[in-house]
Amino acid sequence: MPTLARVKERAEEQSTCMTTDQQTTIRTLANDLHRLNQSVMKAVDAGVSVEIVRSARHHGGDGNWGDLLIPIIVAGRN
């Protein structure tokens, strides 16, 4: 099975255990990440290197957490 199809299938399986609000939030996150990936590709095509690194970890107080990210940009060679 192709990797992308398996990722989508896994995400759908996991979302069945989530509330409607959680599913909506995850869809928003997925859309934002897609836009981030597009922006990274545009930056690379414009001649810079981009590395996304974890800058911190946000803890929600009830055991949930998420990584916060920052870009490291390296100017391209001219």
Image: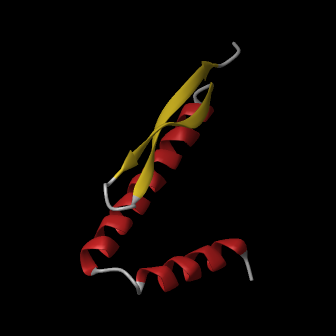
Whole-percent x, y for residue 40 in the image: 54, 39
Q: What count of labels does the image hold?
A: 0
Quadrant of res 10: bottom right
- Among the 4 quarters of the image, the one containing residue 64: bottom left
Give the residue at the far left of this rendering. Answer: 21
Q: Residue at x 31, y 65 (%)?
A: 25
The answer to whether 50 is drawn above or below residue 21 in the figure is: above
Q: Residue most toward the front?
A: 62
| Position above or below: 59 against 27 | above
Instruction: Looking at this view, name the residue that lies furthest to the right.
Output: 1
Q: Quadrant of the N terminus?
A: bottom right
Give the x, y percent position of residue 68.
43, 42
Coloring basis for residues: secondary structure
Identity of the residue drawn at 51% across and 85% down: 13
Residue at point 51%, 47% (across, down): 38
Q: Is residue 42 left or right of residue 20?
A: right
> Where 63 falls versus 1 (above or below)?
above
Does residue 19 lie above or below 72 as drawn? below
Quarter of the image where the C terminus is located: top right
x and y percent of residue 12 in the render? 48, 82
54 displayed left or right of 21:
right
